[in-house]
């Protein structure tokens, strides 16, 4: 038995061998003293390599300091190089910590070689999960960076060579104090140096993260068997020596967590601070692209994905340690200590109960928990809102974009029958009922599929996420159809004001400020929704085509577009039934796309109009002492307009309140289900990746759209109240004027509240992210319990 377990540990430790080999090449894996000279040489080589490239990137940034877009290209990469260099220094400086951690975990695992099979399975389960699921995905996402980094300049040079106009390209945007002539031996030397640097940047980053995750999985395994043994210890074995043994093991795990936090803390802290900045620079570069091609977009997409995965790994690891240490206290409390006769045992148990949960901290400043990941997402939003306000567009382009954007929303709403029309035709009135019937029928058959497969969580979550989306679509149709008259009032009020502003040359630019951000959010969201729906609709067709090409038999396996359970068998009752069902599923997908994109984009559009309205009012409050009558007129108009905005806010809450409340509840569940599905996949296909990217991306962006819009409206209303206070009202001759100012100042900022429960702000987005991570961890625990059974 012991030999078999050693073989299993050896098999699990293969990824540890890979980590050791790669980190050894960089000279940062802790060796014996006899080998240190060679190790130092390699370590210094890597550091010199990084410093050389960082100097070149700094030169590039200084040279292009007047061009923000070009400068940020070098800034993000330079920051990334610095983070990896810091990781190298942490592994080097805290090498003894790494030796102690590896040795302690090895000794603790060897001590458990002869335990019962049940305990052994609990120990190796987290390690097996890391080896089989996390390690390949972390490595693939990381090393895809190397592929993209090496492919981009190579392909660029090859294409230019084939066109007869050879253009030399390198990996990093650098500028040195000497001339680097393209094609010369100096250029070749720089190319080789950057090639090596790109390899070390990715390999050290990826394998360092893998070592961190592997160590976390081992610590969690030992925590779980300790908790299991305490919880299931018979009361007759509750002796002082046994308690000392448990206490010793718990102390060892505490020491391991402290050593790991000391080693990983500095680079996790810096990576957390810098990731938001790096991602914002990447997003800004994408927004500045005139033409988006695969070559241009490949690096930002791969890089952004990897950085988010990296932060998620750090946060998830720290959260697991915290949860397992809390489970230790619960296990102690649930043990048979009440039956123990020895008072010293009871006293020792009380002492163990008072232990605080273990929380890894980055540099004794930032706890490494789930809030770390949500905090980064929040920082990204704050950075974008404070530094990247608008993309410069002339007035004609802005006006044209505004007309196109409003026209696109109107067409989609008319298609769904949800646009407020004064005298609708009979067919137009029936449109929402048709859409509602399709959405509800789809939701019911998918819910039926979920109930049938409720014991299989991996299959059940596929139906759960899609059923939730169709219920959301149904709710949107009901809310708009029920509040059609209110929607007409809201649209008419905002449209009338905006038409007046657009005809005023002085106000046109003010009301169109921020339009590009709203349009890009809406278009990106629509593309992601379309991608996920297209993947669902075309998977059966692609499956049939593949079978026709590869199968020699005449039998074709028909697969449905959606995970649904109909009253009839849609795949075995002949092709006619199948294609009728497939047409229904495609119509449901179109309904989902049209309703989702139109309703969510319309919310953005209404909030954008209200924000522009507030900006105009703020600008109008520029009083001059000599024209009191004009000032009174402006104040009167502001009071009326602000009252109209309050009414618009109330209508917006009435229509969108239930939608937002349901979205808060369901979004975390849907995203969690999608992440869980990807984590449980043994083989990742292109279709699964596209579906996950489109679906999860659209749900995250949908939540962000509502949350950021609410925060933007509140911020603009606060700016308006500030403008009222700064409106040069001191010293006015009329008391009525000052009274009007005072009444305006007593108004609260405009806040959108969903069903009187949640204020729509960026905190809502952070809350959804926190819930997603919590649900994911709960699902994992449920799956582990089911696997044990």
Image (cartoon, grey):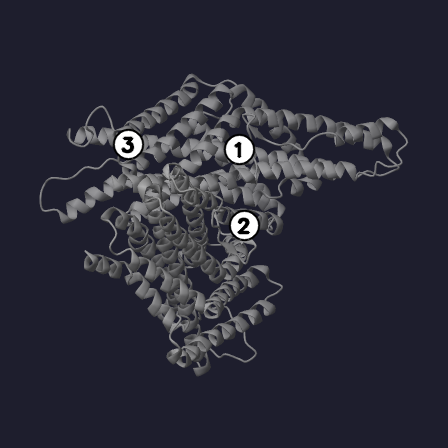
Residue 461 position in % (x across, y down) = 32, 36
Numbered disc in front, either 1 or 3: 3
* Mark 1 surroundings: few (<14), some (14-19) or many (≥20) residues within 10 A: some
Count numbered badges in the picture.
3
Q: Secondary structure at mark 3?
A: loop
Residue 584 position in % (x across, y down) = 29, 29
Residue 588 vertical placement versus 208 (above, below): above
Residue 586 vertical placement versus 89 (above, below): above
Left or right of residue 524: residue 615: right
Q: 662 or 195: nearer the eye? A: 662
Residue 476 position in % (x across, y down) = 45, 27
Left or right of residue 704: residue 472: left
Circles 1 and 2, Cβ within 8 Å, touching? The answer is no
Which badge, 1 or 3, is on the more N-terminal residue? 3
Pointer 3 residue: 454
Quadrant where the C terminus is found in the figure:
top left
Pointer 1 residue: 603
- Is residue 682 something one can see in this rendering? no
Image quadrant assignment for residue 273: bottom right
Q: Secondary structure at mark 1?
A: helix
Image quadrant assignment for residue 9: bottom left
Q: 517 or 77: nearer the eye? A: 77
Numbered disc in front, either 3 or 2: 3
Pointer 2 residue: 380
Q: Which residue is drawn at the image coordinates 55% and 80% (left, top)?
A: 178
Which residue, as the protein is rendered here, is positioned at the far bottom?
185
Q: CA distance from mark 1 to mark 2?
A: 22 Å
Q: 150 or 69: nearer the eye? A: 150
């Amino acid at each position: 038995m012991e030999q078999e377990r050693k073989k299993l540990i050896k098999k699990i430790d293969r990824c540890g061998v890979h980590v050791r080999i790669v980190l050894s090449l960089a000279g940062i894996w802790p060796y014996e003293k006899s080998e240190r000279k060679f190790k130092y040489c390699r370590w210094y080589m890597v550091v010199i390599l990084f410093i050389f490239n960082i100097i070149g990137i700094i030169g590039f940034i200084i040279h292009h300091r007047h061009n923000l877009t070009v400068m940020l290209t070098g800034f993000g990469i330079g920051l990334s190089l610095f983070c990896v260099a810091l990781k190298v220094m942490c592994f080097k400086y805290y090498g003894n910590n790494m030796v102690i951690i590896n040795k302690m975990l090895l000794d603790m695992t060897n001590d458990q070689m002869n335990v019962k099979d049940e305990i052994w399975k609990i120990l190796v389960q987290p390690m097996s999960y890391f080896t089989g699921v996390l390690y390949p995905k972390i490595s693939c996402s990381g090393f895809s960076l190397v592929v993209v980094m090496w492919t981009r300049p190579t392909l660029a040079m090859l294409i230019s060579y084939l066109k007869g106009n050879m253009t030399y390209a390198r990996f990093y945007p650098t500028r040195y104090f000497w001339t680097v002539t393209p094609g010369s031996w100096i250029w070749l030397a720089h190319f080789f140096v950057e090639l090596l640097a790109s390899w070390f940047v990715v390999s050290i980053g990826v394998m360092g993260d893998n070592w961190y995750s592997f160590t976390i999985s081992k610590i969690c395994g030992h925590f779980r068997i300790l908790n299991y043994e305490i919880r299931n210890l018979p009361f007759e074995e509750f002796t002082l020596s046994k308690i000392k043994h448990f206490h010793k093991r718990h102390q060892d795990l505490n020491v391991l967590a402290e050593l790991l936090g000391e080693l990983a803390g500095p680079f996790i802290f810096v990576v957390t601070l810098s990731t938001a900045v790096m991602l914002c620079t990447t997003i800004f570069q994408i927004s500045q692209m005139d033409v988006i091609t695969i070559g241009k977009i490949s690096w930002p997409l791969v890089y952004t994905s990897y950085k988010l995965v990296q932060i998620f790994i750090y946060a998830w690891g720290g959260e697991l340690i915290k949860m397992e240490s809390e489970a230790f206290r619960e296990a102690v409390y649930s043990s048979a200590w009440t039956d123990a006769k020895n008072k010293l045992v009871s006293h020792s148990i009380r002492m163990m109960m008072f232990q605080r949960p273990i929380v890894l901290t980055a540099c004794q400043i930032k706890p490494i928990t789930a809030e770390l990941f949500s905090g980064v997402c929040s920082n990204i939003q704050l950075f974008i809102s404070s530094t990247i306000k608008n993309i410069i567009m002339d007035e004609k382009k802005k006006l044209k974009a505004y007309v196109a954007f409003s026209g696109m929303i109107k067409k989609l709403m008319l298609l769904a029958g949800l646009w407020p029309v004064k005298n609708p035709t009979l067919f137009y009135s029936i449109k929402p009922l048709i859409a509602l019937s399709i959405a509800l029928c789809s939701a019911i058959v998918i819910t039926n599929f979920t109930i049938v497969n409720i014991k299989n969580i991996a299959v059940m979550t596929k139906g759960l996420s899609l059923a939730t989306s169709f219920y959301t679509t149904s709710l949107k149709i009901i809310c708009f159809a029920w509040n059609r008259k209110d929607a007409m009032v809201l649209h008419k009020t905002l449209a009338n004001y905006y038409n007046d502003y657009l005809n005023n040359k002085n106000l046109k630019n003010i009301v169109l400020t921020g339009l590009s951000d709203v349009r890009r959010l809406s278009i990106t969201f629509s593309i992601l929704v379309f991608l996920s729906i297209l993947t669902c609709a075309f998977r059966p067709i692609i499956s049939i085509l593949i079978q026709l090409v590869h199968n020699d038999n005449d039998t074709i396996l028909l697969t449905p577009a959606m995970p649904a359970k109909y009253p009839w068998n849609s795949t075995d009752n002949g092709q006619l039934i199948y294609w009728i069902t497939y047409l229904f599923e495609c119509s449901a997908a179109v309904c989902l796309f049209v309703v989702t994109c139109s309703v969510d984009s319309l919310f953005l559009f209404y909030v954008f109009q209200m924000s522009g309205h507030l900006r105009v009012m703020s600008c109008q409050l520029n009083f001059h002492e000599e024209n009191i009558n004009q000032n009174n007129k402006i104040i009167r108009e502001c009071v009326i307009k602000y009252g109209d905005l309050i009414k618009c806010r109330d209508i917006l809450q009435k229509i969108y309140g239930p939608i937002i409340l349901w979205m808060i509840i369901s979004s975390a569940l849907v995203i969690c289900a999608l992440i869980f599905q990807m984590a449980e996949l043994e083989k990742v296909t292109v279709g699964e990746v596209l579906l996950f990217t489109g679906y999860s991306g659209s749900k995250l962006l949908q939540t962000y759209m509502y949350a950021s819009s609410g925060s933007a409206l509140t911020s603009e209303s606060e700016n308006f109240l500030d403008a009222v206070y700064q409106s040069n009202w001191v010293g006015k001759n009329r008391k009525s004027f000052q009274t009007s100012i005072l009444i305006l100042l007593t108004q609260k900022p405009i806040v959108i509240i969903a069903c009187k429960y949640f204020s729509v702000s960026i905190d809502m987005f952070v809350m959804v992210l926190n819930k997603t991570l919590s649900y994911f961890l709960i699902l994992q625990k449920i799956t582990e319990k089911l696997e044990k059974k």
